[in-house]
Every structure is written in C-alpha cells, then in structure tokens.
Amino acid sequence: MQIKEIGKLPSDHADNGFYGQDIISVSQFNRGNLDYIFGVAHEMRVLVERFGSADLLQGKILANLFYEPSTRTSSSFMAAMLRLGGQVIPINNVQYSSVTKGESLPDTVRTLESYADVIVLRHPEVGAATTAARYAKKPVINAGDGIGEHPTQALLDHFTILEELGKVDGLKVAMVGDLKYGRTVHSLTKLLVNYDVEFVFVSPDILRMPEDVLDVVRGSGRRFSVQEDAHGVIEDADVLYVTRVQKERFSDMAEYDRMKDQYVVDEELMARAKERMIVMHPLPRVNEISYAVDTDPRAAYFRQMRNGMYIRMALLAAVLGKA
Ligand code: NCD
C-alpha cells in the first residue's frame, strides 16, 4: 500500500507502519502491528484517565462521513479527535448533504479531503471504503461497509478481551446471534485467527457465519464448531460475544420477526457461565441481553464501548504520524 499524500512524516515521530495508510480491513493487521496499536490505545486510556485530553492532533481535521445510522462509532471517532486536540466535520445526516442531489461517493470523498486530513466512512455497501480509498489521497478509515467489515470495532473488541482477560491465546470465544449479516463478527473472527483461539459460532441456520469467513478460520488451522444451541456453549466460554439480529439487512420482515429473539442472555444463563469470563456486545442491543445482566461484573459491553474511543485515538494518531 502506498503512503498517501499527507506530507512528510513529522521528524519527531518514527514511522509506525500506519502513517498515511487507509484502514480498510482487519487483514492489514498481524501480531506485530496489533501489539503496537494496543500499546498506543492503552497509553491513550491512561492519558484520558489522567488528563482528559492532549494536543497531539492540534490543527488536524477529521471528516466523519456516515451514510448509515451510528451512535458509538461516529461519536467515539469524534471524541477521539477532540480529545487529541483535533477538529471534526461531522456528516451524519447525508440527507442534508449533496448526496441527495446525486453526488457520487468518489466526488464526496474528494470534496471532504480538500478540507480534512483523514476521512472516516460508514456506508451500506460492501467495498465502499475500498472505493473511497482508491479515490482519496488522504487516509480513509472504514467504519463499517454494509455486511462486509468493521475493522475498528474488531480492534476495540480484541483490545477489550486483552484488557479484561489479559490474553487472547488459549481462549474459547463463542459468537452468538446474527453471524450472517453482523459485520463485527466477520472482522473479529478474521482478526482472532492470528491467535490460538477456539471458536464456537452459534446462530440459526439461516444466519450462520458466511463460508468465506469460515474459510479464513479453516485456512488458519484454528478449531471451530458451528451450532444452533447457545446452552451448550455457556459453561466453558471465556468470551460470549452477542450480536443484534440486523433488522435493516432483512428483506422479509416476517423472517426477521422469527429470528429476532432466538437468543437472550439472562441471569439464568449467566448462572451457568464461568466465574472468569466476559459477555461482549458491539451494541446497540435490542433484546439479546436482559438488563438484569448489566450489573454482573462479567458484563463487559459498556467498558468495551468506552475502549472504542481509545482504539480510535490510537488509529487517528497512527495514520496522522503522531503516535
Ligand atoms: C455494530 C455495527 O454498526 O455494525 N455497531 C457498532 O458499530 N457498534 C453492530 C450493530 O449495529 O448491531
């Protein structure tokens, strides 16, 4: 990948391998550069907890372009930029932008990069971030491309496992729910194959993990199983990663209604889980986790959501050459 035209690396910062790069897919990551990003994210956490903010990205501008709804991803990218002293152009309502006049994604991206230093893009089509990155001279960060990938979510998920359980090697990770349309589980699986993880994919048959993702697991030689019953996995899972049934991806609403409440994590299920394990969810939740579970110390989803800001601070600093 070529370094984009964002100027020479500041002389006081060593190249971290991310400077001027797009972040499109988890396939760009390996154990070495993951350790680097997680190390920086941890420093960002300490920085925020001690000082609240810093001026590392002062003078830099992020264009936050969201063609799909978002609460956490868009606001944590904004908060990340603001906490590092940068500024944000938020475009969360594309219906009020020139997109409704028929402007194409390449033209929108070329417009925004003439004002900003980095572009974050969420779009309903698989491959949209790749297209945007091809046209953009500034770095593009994929914040979710349809049912494709959500690399920054996978990084924050992985970081959360590390912060909570101290390691990833040797863990049994069960993913439950909509594994077909859930982009977060696609990216997380492709990222975790770099480690000695055993996967259990739990979903109704029609929402099973896509073959191309299973092929990545097969190619890695990691152990995995595919099943429909969540009760069989709870006793020995170290990570229970729960997902929302992705209503917006269904063409048949009757089918969505049949699928939506198939798995619900409640106190009864948690009573059978290990004492040291975590429940994760990328959020938003609908009914997949009962509110009673929120106060269980093993419920990590709100801490996970906060970790998103630290990971995005690390990524922004890295692509802008300031980490
Ligand atoms: C996820 C997404 O948008 O893919 N949310 C997120 O980014 N935190 C999961 C979802 O919408 O269910």
Image (cartoon, rainbow, N blue to C red):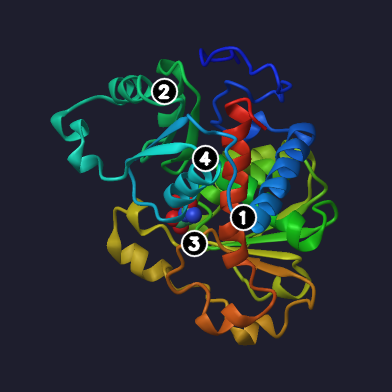
Of badges 4 and 1, the one in the foreground is: 4
> In the rendered structure, which disc, 4 or 2, sits on the residue that comes first in sequence?
4
Residue type, numbered disc 2 = Thr
How far is the residue under mark 3 from the one under mark 2?
27 Å
Is residue 97 left or right of 312 when viewed as pictured?
left
> In the rendered structure, which disc, 3 or 4, sits on the residue that comes first in sequence?
4
The quadrant the C terminus occupies is: top right
Tell me, yes or no, if residue 181 can be seen here: no
Is residue 123 left or right of 295 when viewed as pictured?
left
Above or below 15: residue 295: below
Is label 3 within 8 A of ligand 1 (CB to nearest ligand atom)?
A: yes
Q: Position of residue 228 (x, y in %)?
A: 59, 66
Q: Residue at x 35, y 63 (%)?
A: 255
> In the rendered structure, which disc, 1 or 2, sits on the residue that comes first in sequence?
2
Residue type, numbered disc 4 = Gly
Dot 1 and dot 3 residues touching (CB under 8 Å)? no
Q: Position of residue 240 (x, y in %)?
A: 66, 66
How far is the residue under mark 4 from the one under mark 1?
19 Å
Q: Which secondary structure lies at badge 1?
A: helix
Q: Position of residue 33 (x, y in %)?
A: 74, 32
The quadrant the N terminus occupies is: top right
Residue type, numbered disc 3 = Leu
Q: In front: 47, or 116?
A: 47
Residue 307 got which mark? 1
Provide the residue designation for mark 2: 131
Provide the residue designation for mark 3: 283
Report crowding for label 2: few under 14, some 14 to 19, many 20 or more residues within 10 A (C-alpha): some
Provide the residue designation for mark 4: 85
